[in-house]
Image (cartoon, rainbow, N blue to C red):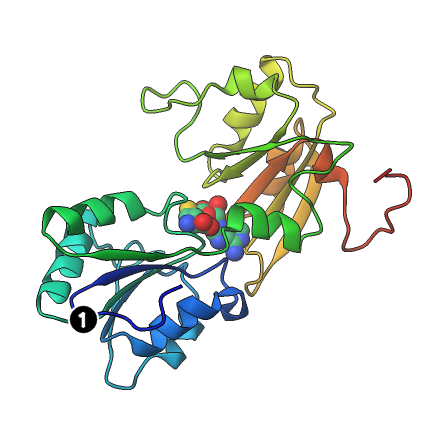
Amino acid sequence: MIKELTPGTVVLVGGGPGDPDLLTVAGLRAIGQADVILYDHLAPNDALADARPDAELIPVGKWPRGKYTPQEEISRLLVEHARAGRRVVRLKGGDNFVFGRGGEEWRACAAAGVPVEVIPGVSSAVAAPGLAGIPVTHRTVSQGFTVVSGHVPPGDPRSTIDWAALAGAHTTIVILMGVKYLPQISATLTDAGLDPATPAAVVMAACMPGSRTLRGTVADIADLAAAEGVTPPAITVIGGVAALDWAHEAPAGVST
Ligand code: SAH
C-alpha cells in the first residue's frame, strides 16, 4: 500500500462505514499526509482530526438539507489541486467504487493527465449488516449476495435492475440508498415470487449515532421502517441471513 503520497497525485481513499476506527491504516496515513482533502458527509469526518493543521479541508458532495457540490465541480477541484502540485485525498464513505463515483473521478483525473491511486475502504454493504450481527452469506443459508442501489424505484425508466431475477436467485439482496422506495422494491420482489415470509432487516446508521436495526419479513419491512421513522443512511438486507443475529443469539439452531 501507499506509504508516501506523491505531489500532484489524487488518492481515492475509502473511509469505511462511519466509525473512524474502521478506516484502513493506509487511509489514515494518507489523511495525515495530504495537502488537500475533499470529503463527503458520509466519510468518517472525525478522522479529519488526523489531517495536518495546514491541510485544506473541503466538504463536497451532498450534505443533508445543505450544500450540494455537483460531480463535475468535484472532479474539477481534484484536477485543479493536483495540477498545482498538491497531495490530494478524495475521502468517501465506505469504498469509493461502491456507489461512490470513484470511476468518474478517476476518469476525470486520467483525462487531465493526473495520476490516481486507490486505497480501498470497508464498504457499508458488508459492514453495516455485519455490525448488526447479520452475515451476508452463511454456508447453510445463502451462497452469495447481490448489492444493488434502490435510489430509483423498480419500473422507473432509469432502473436497470432485474428485480424478478433477484427474487428467484436464492441469494442475499443488499439494498443501498433504498429507504424511500422500500415499499415499491419489496412489493416488486414478492410479486415476482419471493416468499413474503422471507426475512428482511434494515440497518440504519451503522456505527454512527442513532444506530438501529429493524427486523421483519420482506412483506412487512417497509411498513416497519416507515413506522419507526427510518432515515438514510440505511441498508436493507433481504434473505434468510436477515433472521440471523450473531450479536444477540448463540448460534444454536443454525448449523455451521
Ligand atoms: N461508498 C459507500 C456507499 C455510498 S451510497 C460504501 O461503500 O459504503 C450511500 C448509501 O450507503 C447510503 O444511502 C446507505 O444505504 C449506505 N450506507 C453508508 N454508510 C452507512 C451506514 N453507516 N449505515 C447504514 N447504511 C450506510
Image-based side of 33 in relation to 150, left or right: left
Q: Residue at x 44, y 74 (%)?
A: 46
Q: Nearer the viewer, residue 94 or 192?
A: 94
Q: Is mark 1 within 8 Å of ligand 1?
A: no
The quarter of the image holding the N terminus is bottom left
Image-based side of 44 in relation to 6, left or right: right
Badge 1 local density, few (<14 within 10 Å), some, or many (20+)?
A: some
Image-based side of 194 in relation to 177, left or right: right
Asked if residue 221 is positioned above or below residue 88 in the image, the reply reads above
Which residue is disc 1 drawn over? 7
The three-letter amino acid code for the residue at tag 1 is Pro
Q: Residue at x 58, y 13 (%)?
A: 192
- The image shows residue 101 at horizontal and vertical percentages of 30, 46
- The image shows residue 102 at horizontal and vertical percentages of 30, 48
Image-based side of 147 in relation to 86, left or right: right
- Residue farthest top in this picture: 192
Is residue 36 something one can see in this rendering? yes
- Quadrant of the image occupied by residue 98: top left
The quarter of the image holding the C terminus is top right
